[in-house]
């Protein structure tokens, strides 16, 4: 099989896959914010949550249901900032995944990734990383929502964690985006071979 990638391009492909995987896994996992409610661990993502209060009609009490799931509707996401964060981060992850899969195909198909295509792919990765980074920056603006305050002992506010802490998924998403913006964008410039000059 002929490859359209240089040695740097193969490393770029592996890095692109790693960055896309880190960002996508982090984005999907509901462990961006960790806290507790009624002595049970609670965690939030941008559009998913683990452990939530439900009304037990039989005992006439509120209990914590220890399950993970996404919000029933887009409007059910606790704050406007988290809704924007979900869309922006999702689009960014999609772009990183698209470039990573294109780079992977470049390993098997000759003349797929030229120097120009490599630079365009690097630009798309930069935009994707920027979108994910923007989503990560927006996320703390939603810490003043009622759901988060209940989990953080009513001491959380915008950019104030209260008794909660940031989870591994937030760091994973941000690290994937940062690596895509800094490393992948730079390496993409050297990923493609020179295009063959045809006489016609």
Image: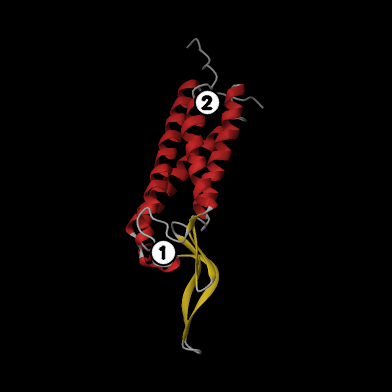
In the image, 95 versus 146, the foreground residue is 146
Confirm whether residue 112 shows in the render: yes
Q: Is residue 165 above or below residue 38?
A: above
Of all residues, the one furthest to the left in this rendering is 80
Label 1: which secondary element = helix
Q: Quadrant of the N terminus?
A: top right
Residue depicted at x 45% and y 25% = 119
Q: Please tell me in which quadrant of the rendered image residue 130 appears.
A: top left
Q: Is residue 60 above or below residue 102?
A: below
Q: How many marks?
A: 2
Crowd rating for badge 2 (residues with CA inside 10 Å; few <14, some 14–19, many 20+): many
Q: Is residue 91 above or below residue 42?
A: above
Q: Position of 142 compared to 97: left or right?
A: left
In the rendered image, which residue does mark 1 sit on?
Answer: 148
Residue 95: x, y in percent?
45, 41
Question: Colour scheme used in the picture?
Answer: secondary structure
Residue depicted at x 57% and y 26% = 9
Residue 37: x, y in percent?
49, 70
**Which callout, 2 or 1, points at the residue further toward the start of the chain?**
1
Of all residues, the one furthest to the right in this rendering is 1
Residue 51: x, y in percent?
52, 69
Residue depicted at x 44% and y 64% = 152
Label 2: which secondary element = helix
In the rendered image, which residue does mark 2 sit on?
Answer: 187
């Amino acid at each position: 099989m002929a490859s359209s990638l240089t040695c740097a391009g193969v490393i770029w492909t592996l890095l692109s896959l790693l960055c896309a995987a880190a960002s996508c896994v982090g984005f999907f996992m509901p462990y961006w914010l960790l806290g507790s409610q009624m002595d049970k661990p609670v965690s939030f993502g941008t559009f998913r949550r683990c452990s939530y209060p439900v009304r037990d009609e039989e005992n006439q009490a509120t209990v914590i249901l220890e399950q993970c799931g996404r919000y029933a509707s887009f409007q059910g996401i606790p704050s406007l900032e988290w809704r924007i964060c979900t869309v922006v981060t999702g689009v960014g992850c999609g772009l990183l995944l698209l470039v990573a899969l294109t780079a992977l195909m470049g390993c098997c198909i000759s003349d797929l990734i030229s120097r120009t295509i490599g630079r365009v792919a690097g630009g798309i990765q930069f935009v994707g990383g920027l979108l994910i980074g923007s989503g990560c920056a927006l996320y703390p603006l939603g810490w003043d929502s009622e759901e988060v305050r209940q989990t953080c002992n009513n001491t959380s506010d915008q950019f104030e964690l209260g008794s909660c802490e940031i989870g591994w998924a937030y760091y994973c998403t941000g690290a994937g985006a940062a690596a895509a913006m800094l490393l992948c964008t730079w390496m993409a410039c050297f990923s493609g071979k020179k295009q063959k000059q045809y006489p016609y």
